[in-house]
Image (cartoon, grey):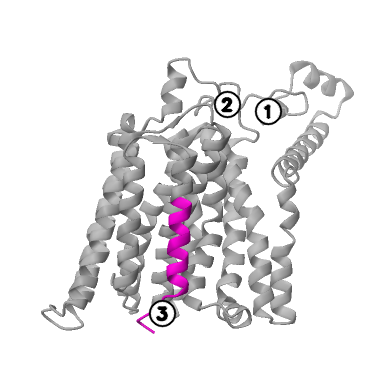
Amino acid sequence: MGSPNGRAMYRTDDEVPFDSEINFHPSESSLMDVHGSHSGESRTVHHETLAGMIYRSIQVVVFSNKLNLLMPFGPLAILVQKLTGHLGWVFGLSLLGIMPLAERLGYATEQLAFYTGDTVGGLLNATFGNATELIISIYALKSGMTRVVQLSLLGSILSNMLLVLGCAFLCGGIVNHEKEQVFNKAAASVNSGLLLMAVMGILFPAVLHYTHTEVHVGKSELSLSRFSSCIMLVAYVAYLFFQLKSQRNLYVSVNEDEGQNGNNSNDDESSDISKWETIIWLSVMTAWISILSEYLVGAIEGASTAWEIPVAFISVILLPLVGNAAEHASAIMFAMKDKLDISLGVAIGSSTQISMFVIPFCVVIGWITGHPMDLNFQLFETAVLFLTVIVVAFMLQEGTANYFKGLMLILCYLIVAASFYVHVDSSQ
């Protein structure tokens, strides 16, 4: 990829940089002065330039992908909800409407990565991808749906680590089959350690509950969960400082390192839109995904009844598929372009962010708002999470990726999905 902090290089006459359009040449200014209406014409030209920039931005982001033909299904889901209230249709239409938005969110994050670099780009993608889940979790927590929060966040971690990373390895390995893909092994090891720490924080309250060894029955488990959540939040903040400030050289991706040595084959790539355009599009699409996700969550129980699927299976498997759609699309896209460090930053980074920030943050928010939530995810769910982290840690220890590793991760996810389909939630 090109220089992360460099300006976008445009190859055609139609793609003119924004700065060059608003900076008039002296000859043009003189010509307007001769005709005697410099100020009025200057305002007109500036207005046309802004309109042209907006038109080109919409054309590049919205009309450049055939998948965006599914975008009207989002407003249609809202319309069906208002007119008929058929929750099964609302769920399906919302699912279709979110898909192109997720793909475009990944595209916009890729454009922003040209200005920020691979490490920050992956972190931003994970953050934007998890913003919807955090909003939904807080909304559900305030509504007293604590178990839904736990299951959906657990499902998001499992989906990112097995399905998203597996599809990225599989697609990247097939497209780049002539060579072995590599990534920053040191950075992956740090993420694996954080995930194991999150498992520790979630495991101990469950063990305390099922061994009946609480000092104060019903209180020690909650107190331990709140204490562990605060520790996990401190650890995640320290991790961000370590990643972005203290040890930035540890997180230099393989592609960036090769680019510094003159061996990068992606030097000719450049951003299609400016940095501020990218930020605006990220904000707009994140907001629209959040709106549709609320309709999606509200239709879960109705869809469960209409489709005869357990609510727990929808919460752990189907709902995270939608919530992780942005990570899924972007991780595959980056892996196919041999930018595997960004793919890992998206998939594993998102799992780390959910386990070390979103889940503890929900516990603290519930503590503040009077809606208690603990880290006891029940024994079956905790065991699934522990084994998933162990499997993925083994896959990442060599610092290489291929399509077979991706296939194994996907097959592991199918086993997990089948397990939850036949699992009865013990808390209900």
The image shows residue 307 at horizontal and vertical percentages of: 62, 78
Residue sticking out furthest to the right? 35
Q: Is residue 421 above or below residue 85?
A: above
The image shows residue 132 at horizontal and vertical percentages of: 51, 61
Location of the C terminus by quadrant is bottom left
Determine which quarter of the picture holds residue 38.
Answer: top right
Whether residue 121 is visible: no
Q: Is residue 86 above or below residue 194?
A: below
Q: Residue at x 41, y 31 (%)?
A: 253
Q: Which residue is mark 2?
A: 7
Q: Check contact, mark 1 vs mark 3: CB within 8 A.
A: no
From mark 1 to mark 3, how far is it between C-alphas? 57 Å
* Boundaries of the magenta span: 409-428
Residue type, mark 2 in image? Arg
Q: Is residue 248 above or below residue 86?
A: above
Q: Which residue is mark 3?
A: 424
Q: Which residue is mark 1?
A: 17
Badge nearest the viewer, 3 or 2: 3
**Magenta span includes 420:** yes
Determine which quarter of the picture holds residue 413.
Answer: bottom left
The image shows residue 45 at horizontal and vertical percentages of: 80, 33
Secondary structure at numbered mark 2:
loop
Q: Residue at x 63, y 81 (%)?
A: 306
Mark toward the start of the polypeptide (3 vs 2): 2
Mark toward the start of the polypeptide (2 vs 1): 2
